[in-house]
Image (spheres, rainbow, N blue to C red):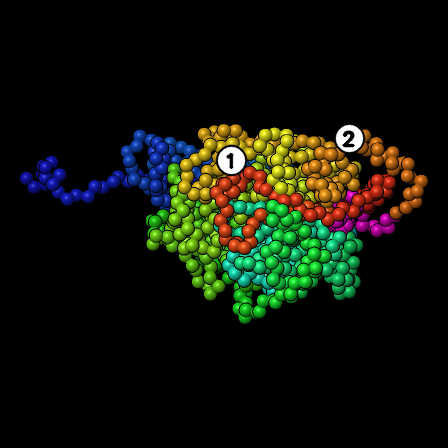
Amino acid sequence: MAGNVCAEEVNNTNVDTVTPVKSVNVEVNYEYTGDNAKVMPDFYIYSGEDKIEYNKELINSNSYVLTFNDTFSKEYNITAMTAGYVSQSQIILSDSIIFNLKASDAYKLGYDVTADADKILDFKTADDILVITSAGVPKYNSRTSEDAVEAIYNYQYKYGQSIPYNNVLMLRQTAVDNIDFAFIVKRGNELKAVIYEKASKTPVYVGTISENMTRVQWNNYFNSLSGENAWAFASLTNAWVAGASNIILQEAAFHGHVCEGTLGGYSIVQALLKYYSPVGASDYYDILGVPGGSDDDAVIYFLDATPGKIGDVGINMRLNGYIGFNTTSTGVSENMIGFIRWGASSGTLIIMEYNKSKITALFEKETGINPKSGSLEELKYNTWWVKNIKNNPEKMADIIYEFDNLTRAQYFELIGDGKTVEARGLDLDYILYLNLPKATRNSASGLDISLSDKQIEQIGVDATNLAISIFKNQKGIDITKDMVDLSVLTSAGYVYLGSSDTVLARNGINKVLGATLTSATLLPIHTPAYKPLWFAYVLRSPDSDILDTVFIKYNPDGTFFVGEFNGSNVADVGINSINNSATVKALSSKFAIDESFFGVQSIGNVWMSHPEFDQLLSFLFHSHACPGVQPGFFITDFIQENFPLGENESYKYIGSSIYCKDDSLIYLLGISPGMGDYFLQKLPGNETDSTYADGAKDEGVLIVWDSNLNIGRAVIITYTSAKLKKVAVNTQDANRHVQIQTYLDIYAKKDNSLVISKPTVESNEEKWITYEQYLELTSGSKDLNALSYLKGLPSVSKEDLLNSMKNNSESNSNSNTNTNSNSDSNANENSHSSANVNNVGVSSNYNNMPQSSSYDVGNSNDVLGSDSEVSEDEGKSYEVSKKSPAKSINPDYMPYVVIVILIVGILVGAGYMKHRK
């Protein structure tokens, strides 16, 4: 009979098996309805423990059809996710599902203040908009507050119009700092701001923030704010309007404000890279600084020369590093910086400065304004700086000395060798004694790339679209906007293309993918300014260790290099790949080239584990992830919990054992060489071996300084590393990854079978100290290290110390005939040019500790032994460095110092705009 087919005939017929397809209509409603047109949700679908792949089709602004192969599971679970919103899950019981996503507390805060600022300022009528915020690391309802910034990115003041990604500046703050917002609009020559403080949704100030405001307006502005970020908001805003480059604004946000030090440091770096750029691919810089001036932070930022990397080990390349202590007794000024450009076997030594007195005199001659008269004058001074460095920044920097043929032995004399040679630092007497030949400056290359902002942004767009097509064509993966499991790691924003910075390439990525730093989907890795521009698109899967990656580098001729591995442009850089030495070698040389692979794979693999936002920022600042960074997380928490800051108090830290963790301390504790509250005294390992706990290290000395009383509470911070079981892995990269993951679990209070004992932090030798003793501590204590000096001080109670100071003051009062009066009506003003707003006492010159390096510069690509590479969080062996003699204050003169401090505090204390905590 026609149409009848028996079973046997069917079995013998060539018929393709058809897999049933299931479709689900999903509607996602956001608590803030404006987000429906701005962001796209991401979804997970699971059948039991199995993740189901699906296709997503957009129907309208908040409706989607998800299609997937039906496995006839009894139950499918679907989860809807969007950055800033609380994820929700449902069982698929019908063909239609509705999600009503609720915003996180921090997201609500950010969205509500942005909407309120829009009502006041009317964003849509502005020529341009700038946002400056301390949100991100500071805690809001016990969680980091990055969602508040995410809300600012998402807010649409007009359909399809949001604040440009690069126009949101995040200040470097600590977990215990206040959450403040400043929204500024520009209309012609008018600058108007609305400012919110302490996570309040009610503004504390609405009005002008222009440098052209009157004195009365300035005082109204300043008195309306609590003071902590008043100068930050004003200096950044006016530099922005004056045309400061995006990268200068980014560095100033890291430092905390704009001042002549940040601009001078930028000028110095530009001159360095023009006249003494790296010659070979493996060349690196060691920076010899004099902490206390903002230029030190600028150099650290632009060259990725962080203190924590001066002791970095475990990778087959040498990274830029920073050392610095007070060597002014040898003839240098605090605005001088030395650069050692080390090649294969010899070095070039350049000493540069921005001459404050000369530049200030030039400004006064041209404008008739004294920048030291007050904050309004300094804002005008900053604007003058910005305009002068736009086209020729190096003209603001002076090259004082240029020497060549620095030998290996001389190199170690300057930075120390960590074994027997003590560091001299920027010792001008010794440097001139060497009688080195004059170095030859670089010849002009004739190739000056200058790209517009639009062109830079388009590079980000083009690279991203290229990566999307590669994932689709080679892996069949559809990359869509706002994916939670795709992140872009990039050098964009740190590096230059000729004379053009690349910050706006991040905008291009954001436009295509909706990626942001605060959603952990756009991760700029700290990179020296002279390195290539590259992008790594990494894709994780929640049920796999695979980290599929596309690597793209921008070539100077406008083309792209695309990494290739085993015939594919998509390579796995996850744990399985980095556990194979041959694979690591191939990926480093052919895929993620130009020394970028280590940062890409280490941070990419950490990102897979969803670390806390502040931890991720620390890894990014350090330029890679390693277990050596992680002790800083535990130490920072210990300090903030056990030594919380009160009014007029700030942290000072003297490092004794210097390694990667110092970078996380700098980032999370709000300290830095440029702020004058982070000092380096790199001691030999046996001198940091603790006597307080077995196997512990005395990491350094913490001082909680009271600027009002001019005394401090000093303690030794002791850290004991966790004890971990050994894991059978094949490479140091894999072993490092296992350690990182274990420490992440410990910090998150998750069980981990590798943990034998957890890390501990404790404080010892608590002493109350005077200003003179503070100088001794920060100067190396006259041939003693800070640890031994503190141990030798007598224990005196706070009350007894204050009484002693009072009695000394009274006994000498008859000889104190100095009277001071202030005729300046601008009582809220002072100069911020030095950028060191936490100066102790009356001295701005700190006697900082020198460091030493344990690297063999004979071969900059030497790979260290496995013990060093694996145990980055253990103490290293360092040599005591030479110390500049502290200028001791006679105890008989202390009463005069105290009186002067009190007078200065009354006159200008209120004007300290940026009180770093």
Residue 46, how many percent across, how many down? 36, 35
- Check if residue 444 falls in the magenta segment: no
Q: Amino acid at mark 2?
A: Val
- Quadrant, the N terminus: top left
- Classify mark 1: helix, strand or loop: helix
Q: Quadrant of residue 552?
A: bottom left
> Residue, x 77% and y 30% (percent of image)?
796
Q: Tags 1 and 2 in contact by the CB under 8 Å rule? A: no
Q: Earlier in the sequence, mark 1 or mark 2?
A: 1
- Check if residue 829 falls in the magenta segment: yes
Which mark identifies residue 743? 1
| Residue 387, visible in the rendered structure | no
- Classify mark 2: helix, strand or loop: loop
| Predominant SS of the magenta segment | loop
Residue 308, how many percent across, how many down? 59, 45
Q: Amino acid at mark 1?
A: Tyr
> Residue, x 42% and y 54% (percent of image)?
589
Mark 2 packing: few (<14 Cα in 10 Å), some, or many (20+)?
A: few
Residue 420, how many percent across, how many down? 62, 46
Which mark identifies residue 796? 2
- Distance from disc 1 to disc 2, alpha carbons, whole Å, reads 38 Å
Find the magenta span and give its range. 821-846
Q: Quadrant of residue 266?
A: bottom right
